[in-house]
Structure formats: structure tokens, C-alpha cells
Image (cartoon, rainbow, N blue to C red):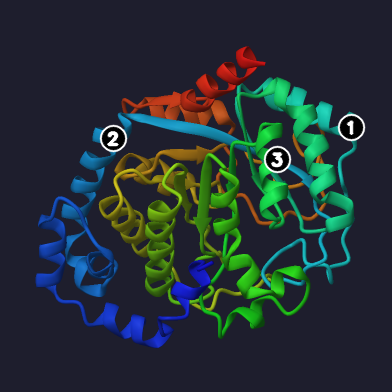
Amino acid sequence: METFYDVHRQYDWEEVKASILAKTEQDVLVALGKPYRNIEDFKALVSPAAERHLEEMAKLSQQLTQKRFGKTIQFYVPLYLSNDCTNQCVYCGFNSNNRVGRVTLNHDQIIEEINAIKALGFEHILLVTGEHPKNCGFKYLKEAIRLIRPHFHCISAEVAPMSTEEYRTMYEEGLYAVYIYQETYSQTRYPEYHPGGVKANFRYRLETPDRLGMAGIHKIGLGCLLGLEDWRTEGFFAAMHIRYLEKKYWKSKYSISFPRLRHFPGSFEPNYLVTDRNLLQLILAFRIFDQELELSLSTRETPVFRDNVFSLGITLMSAGSKTVPGGYAKQISEVEQFAVIDNRPAQVVREAIEKQGYEVIWKDWDQSLQFNFLNHAH
């Protein structure tokens, strides 16, 4: 069976990059004037030629977002269950070579985190772990979902890739969405960032969204780690991946996230600078390219950037995030997976959003209706 890996192989990274840089201002204007855009139009929207049209793109992106999603922002919060990991990703604090305290939450600790997060008002929770098959693999996650499901309306996960059958089982247990980041679509450079561990298998990771689609997962989220490679080319492959999935697994919803590597002393240095203006252009391009796509922005970004950008195309935001296991119930100083830059409490972020005339949604109503239907059916 064909997967996205077969599609990916048909494209040369450097040729794609050159074709994006060759796009003209006329190509941009044509893309902006269409009711629907193809992948060539996306190239134009992320090209240097489009930089002169960011204001026009922002207005169109905002209009398209409000037409489809209204003036609403969904809130979610990550719950880090474990920082155990067998991978050696050079950019990640959970790297198995790092000599840090390893924690996998037990039953009682998960309950403590649930109580602390519920007190903050969240109904949409994102489960996050490192990739350690024994300590926080399929069996552990299935039990965690059973424990967590009665307390939240929406459960998503950002965990190690699994098989189709494992995903199907997790869906039956109450898992709503899965986010799987390819990190980089450059197969040539991928091994430099992932020298060891299961994640070193480029093809297995790239085919994970196919397995999610076959399992019937309600929502599938993609993303690249911006700063590893050229952001314009990464954006193209992510957009092409989304379009492929939407056509093949049309019953699922889709989202894309924009995690950006930042400079910190002693940390992994980004190979490619992604400025605020670059990131804004990428967000606008995705919204104009796909009006149904959910766009997510995390606490990696500054409060100023988040407050100024969310109304231009974002539909989903995290707030009050703790990126260490047990970080909500207790003050824990273990290594973070990444540094949180927007440290504002969730209620402060909510107030900033509401000041701009937007409503914060604490749960996914679509999932709530499905959840209630399944409960009554049983």
C-alpha cells in the first residue's frame, strides 16, 4: 500500500527549495486571488516574494479563520507523564545521553496532576512522554488514558509512534487526537539530528500519520521543528503531507503546530534562523492554503508574539504549560523538554485573548458530543 513515504521520495529537497525561491510577485498575487490554493500556490505564499504582501495575507488569513472558526481560541494544556527516553535527538532535553533525573508518573502522581490541572479550568489535555517502550509505551499509556478519561472532555497525545492496531485500541479507550512531529522532512539531514533510538528510523516516523488515518483517529496533528532546516522547504513538505492525508483519510481532522527552536546558552543551536516575521508568514500561508486546518501555537513563543498573532489564523493555544513530569502539582526542577517562554498563568492568557474580543473555548465541543454519544450508546 502506498504511503506518504512513496510520495515524499518523488521530490528532491534542493529542487523544491529552488522552486520556492523562484516564485515571483505575480505568483503571489495569483495565489491570493484564488478561492482555493494548490501546492504551487503554497510555494508562492512562503516565498521571499510574498514578504512584501504580509499585511494583505494577514487580513485574508484573519477573514478565512473567522469565517470557519469564529472568534474563538481553543485552550489545551500538556501533561508530561514521563521524561524517560531511548532516543538521542540532539536538540531535546530528554536525550538519553543526558544525565538527568528520569521520572515516569505512577497512578497516584497522575491523580495529583489531574487535580492540579482541573483546578486551572482545562478540559483539553495533551499527554506527552519521551519514547521509552518499556517505561512509558503502549501499555502504560493505555492505563493512563483509562485513569484520565473520566476527568477531561478531550484527550490528545504526543508520544512515541505506534502500530495501527495500538492506535485503534487507544482510540477505543478514549484518545481523541495524536500529534506526531517529523521534526525535519529532509531525509538526508534527518540522521544528523537523530543518531540513535527508534526515532532514527525516518520512514517509520514519516508513515505514522498513515497508521493514524487507518486507525480512524479523530484528529491528526503534524509539525516540523523550525530551525533545523530551511523553514520554507519544511513548510512545503508539511503542506503536501496535510493535503495527501486529507484526501486519503478524509474522515479525520487535521492540525499543524509551529514549534520553533530558540537560542539558549549551552543548548542546541538552530541551524537556520526563523524570525518572528518568518513564523508569521508560515502561519498565514497555511491558513490561506487550507481553511479547514487547525493551527496551534505553544508557549515556546513570547507573550508579545502570541498576543499579536493569534487573531491572524491560530485556533488552538496552550497556556500555563509545565514541561516536566509532575510540574503542576509540585515545583519540580528536573530538566525540561524545552524552555517555556510564555510563563503567564492560563487565566492571564485568557484575559489577553478576551480583550481582543475573542472567546476562549476550554474543550472541543465536537469531541464532547461524540464522548456523550458513546457513553449513552454503552
Which residue is drawn at the image coordinates 35% and 54% (left, top)? 283
Q: Which residue is mark 3?
A: 170
- Residue 328 percent across, percent down from the top left: 75, 34
Which residue is drawn at the image coordinates 89% and 52% (left, top)? 135
The answer to whether 122 is drawn above or below residue 44 in the figure is above
- Residue 354 percent across, percent down from the top left: 39, 25
Q: Which residue is mark 1?
A: 107
Pointer 1 local density, CA inside 10 Å: few below 14, some 14–19, many at least 20 = few
Q: At numbered mark 2, what does the secondary structure look like: helix, strand or loop? A: helix
- Taking the image as shown, residue 168 lies to the left or right of residue 270, namely right
- On the rendered image, what quadrant is the C terminus found in? top right
Q: Is residue 264 visible?
A: no
Q: At numbered mark 1, what does the secondary structure look like: helix, strand or loop? A: helix
Mark positioned earlier in the residue sequence (1 or 3) = 1
- On the rendered image, what quadrant is the N terminus found in? bottom right
Front residue (pair 339, 105) = 105
Front residue (pair 241, 51) = 241
- Taking the image as shown, residue 260 lies to the left or right of residue 267, namely left
Front residue (pair 140, 57) = 140
Pointer 3 local density, CA inside 10 Å: few below 14, some 14–19, many at least 20 = many
- Taking the image as shown, residue 223 lies to the left or right of residue 118, namely left
- Residue 276 percent across, percent down from the top left: 39, 60
